[in-house]
Amino acid sequence: MITPKPLLRRQLNLATRHQLASSGIPDGTITSRTRPGGPWQRLLPRVYLLQTGPPDHRQRALAAVLYAAEPAADPLSGDTAVLTGGAALALLGIRDVPYTPADVLVRAPRRLTGTPEVRPLATARWPRTIAVSGIPSTRPVRAAADFASRAGDPARIRSTLAHVVQAGWCHPQDLHAELRAARLLTRPAIRAAASELVAGVRSIAEALARDTLTATDLPTPLWNARLHTPDGTFLASPDAYWPDEGVALEIDSVEYHYTRDAWHATLLRRLRLESHGILVVSATPSMIRDTPTPRSSQPCAPSSRSRHPAAPHPGPWPAATNSSRCSPGWGDARAVKGAG
């Protein structure tokens, strides 16, 4: 028996019954080779893995697309079926996103019966597609929106959308536009998550800090603003920054700072900020979570005379003189030398 080797190379050792039959393999051969103990495996109805070992996550994802694609179409073209939602985000490396059942878009009005492993979603808004590890997928912005539309846990929606933006897979404004086009901003959890991303929040820890700070009388900070020196040189992008007070908040999460290189980069960033007269406040996510209302170490009222050096402002604008100092009160606020 001759197996379609070029096809198997393209499709990660996967094939549909239609493809095998088109290659001249009789139905009886397919049935016999997929019996218990045989060399092939039936992963889904009409979808087979032509190997004895277990499938990996890429093969399971592509199997979902093969199942949903129209039999006579090229399943890798993305014309009749495309991976989206959590399964597509998992291929991009988004952490802790549920990828089973795999969401696969099919063109409306076509209807396809789902399985425990595959959830076909009919859509009239056919997306632009990309190939991720050889698997036809929606772009990250659409995958994130499709995930949010099916997720019921507000915390999971918030975390996943933040991870997609933080990883650089899409811009928060583009995500907001996609959610609006899908009419998902009417849902409170999705609207809140999208709004905080547009405001500059890039992680669940920052979102928690934003919630906590909103409940205080502290001024509203800028989130992840890119700070520049007066001559336009990029300085740093602290998690939160109060430009009028010259105060930065750095949220030190073990998840992102557990390696020596990450810790070293964090220290250098803090030293750069302090060398330009910025008061740096450090806090861990647990400190923020366990402190319902942070305290101000000093009132944030303008003083008539500043003793602090000029603090960088976001963007290319000139730096302004600090008028006061304020601290959210988490951890040890370390002032620069000569900052009173």
Image (tube, helix red, strand yellow):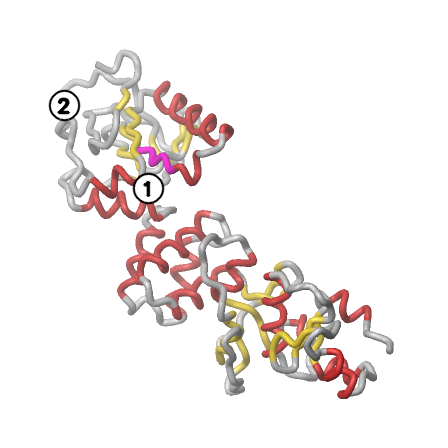
Query: What residue is pinned by disc 1?
Result: 223
| Secondary structure of residue under mark 1 | strand
Residues shaded magenta: 249-253
Q: Is residue 252 magenta?
A: yes
Q: Nearer the viewer, residue 298 or 75?
A: 75
> For residue 35: magenta?
no
Q: Decide if residue 130 is on the left or right side of residue 97.
A: right
- Residue at the image point whose x is 19% and y is 38% from the top: 219
Q: Residue furthest right?
A: 1
Q: Residue furthest top?
A: 338
Rate crowding at label 2 as few (under 14), some (14 to 19) or many (20 or more) other CA atoms within 10 Å. few
Of 55 and 64, nearer the camera is: 55
Q: Which residue lies at the image location 25% right of the left edge and 18% below the top edge? A: 308
- Give the spatial CA distance, label 2 vs label 1: 25 Å
The disc at residue 303 is 2
Q: Position of residue 249 (x, y in %)?
A: 30, 33
Q: What amino acid is at disc 2?
A: Ser
At mark 2, the secondary structure is loop
Residue at 52% across / 85% down in the picture?
A: 113
